[in-house]
Amino acid sequence: MHIDLSAFTGACPCGHEHPIVVKDIVIESGAIRSLPEKVKPWDAPCIVCDENTFTAAGKAVSALLPEADVVCVSPQGLHADEHGVAAVREKLPETADVLLAVGSGTIHDISRFLAHEKEIPFISVPTAASVDGFVSTVAAMTWQGCKKTMPAVAPLYVVADSDIFSAAPQRLNASGFGDLLGKYTALADWKISKAVTGEYYCDRVAGLMSRAVEDVRAAVDEIAAGGRDGCEKLMYGLLLSGLAMQMVGNSRPASGAEHHVSHLWEMGVLAPPPDALHGEKVGIGLALCAEQYHAFAAALRSGTLRPGPRPDTRAEIERYFPDAGMRELILEENVPDPLDDVTAEKALGARDEILAAIDEIPSAEELRALLRKAGGVAEPGEIGVREDIVPLTLRISPYVRRRLTLMRLRKVFENI
Ligand SMILES: [Zn+2]
Ligand SMILES: [Zn+2]
């Protein structure tokens, strides 16, 4: 099956063109057999993979493209950071004119970053339905210890072979499911920010994302079973989510307060980073945030919210981010402060829109049940995050990004 990209392009009522870079997205059994045709225009293709993804798919891709070089790195301690980039860069032939990212999230982020650096295109060959970043235009990376969105390129093609990705461990599928469920709070944050600050928002993109989430949620039993159909549905939803990001040129439709929780843990600010997959942290962060969002909605409905002095951003960051280098980067990230023009009165003026946005998020219990049903984790303790750092996580995670979320907005109220 090909995703019909023409359905998403053309003039949009929001006023944007929504350029889509990717030329074709194919999700089906045997999809990699289309690679020789796709790679034909280039002289020096190079496959980028790690030892695990080489076994899972790189070997088969290499057999189809005997002229391609293969850069295979150790998966041990491989992350989308300056070290991971350096490990691949030093093996990359100077002449490479197209990269094939054969792997999951980390291999993709490293490849898209290097493709951007070398100004060459890249082709995505996902080996697991584990994240939504395959078609994204930006790379989510850790740079000098800080989570950053780095300039990168979107793939020219996505060749998702279900013979390959449906054979991935179920834990990876459950992680992809968690990443996608995270769109519930991400979308609510986007809608709330639009209502309170007038931030750019597109109904078509948000609608596309909502459909992706609902379709994947409805397929939870098939995803839990780990068969080809369930995995294809999950991959389809993840790729739609990536397209939504590509359409607006940033991660706003796909990343909100739940991702900020995950980023804060990855940065190791309050405790050493948990050894867990991206979507596991996002899913757990989602349930924690959903609890807070529904409590906020209840307080808003009952009229018990009182405007309060909002905490001083600079003082909070200086107090809670002990590492000097990271602190500087976070301080920079918070200029201008997303709350600069926001007051409690303004937020209360958007009461109905805020409530409508929160009402679309399932309860924390429902979300945890869904995560478990898919075979995933749902509580901080399951990935080694101590319960006692949860309150501080919720308090300071909004500072990791200059992006208005409800977690950030609620700081203009008392006792929240
Ligand atoms: Zn639009
Ligand atoms: Zn994500």
Image (cartoon, rainbow, N blue to C red):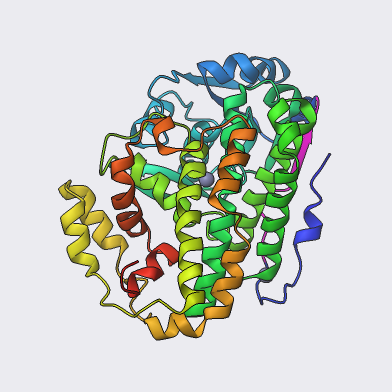
Q: Nearer the viewer, residue 12 or 318?
A: 318
User: Vertically, is 241 above or below 201?
Assistant: above
Q: Can I make out residue 151 in this image?
A: no
Which portion, as a residue range, is magenta?
A: 18-29
What residue is at 64 percent from the left and 37 percent from the top? 123
What residue is at 15 percent from the left and 49 percent from the top? 324
Screen quadrant of the N terminus: top right
Q: Is residue 22 left or right of residue 339?
A: right
Q: Nearer the viewer, residue 220 or 266?
A: 220
Residue 7 in which image quadrant: bottom right
User: Vertically, is 166 above or below 156?
Assistant: above
Screen quadrant of the C terminus: bottom left
What residue is at 36 percent from the left and 59 percent from the top? 398
Q: Nearer the viewer, residue 172 or 135?
A: 172
Q: Does 387 lie within the magenta span?
A: no
Q: Position of residue 290 (x, y in %)?
A: 51, 55
What residue is at 60 percent from the left and 40 percent from the top? 369
Q: Nearer the viewer, residue 328 or 305?
A: 305
Q: Can I make out residue 305 in this image?
A: yes
User: Vertically, is 49 above or below 415?
Assistant: above
Residue 401 in which image quadrant: bottom left
Q: Position of residue 115 (x, y in %)?
A: 52, 40
Q: Is residue 107 left or right of residue 122?
A: left
Q: Position of residue 373 (x, y in %)?
A: 64, 34
Q: Position of residue 129 (x, y in %)?
A: 64, 33
How many circles with numbers are drawn on the protein? Answer: 0
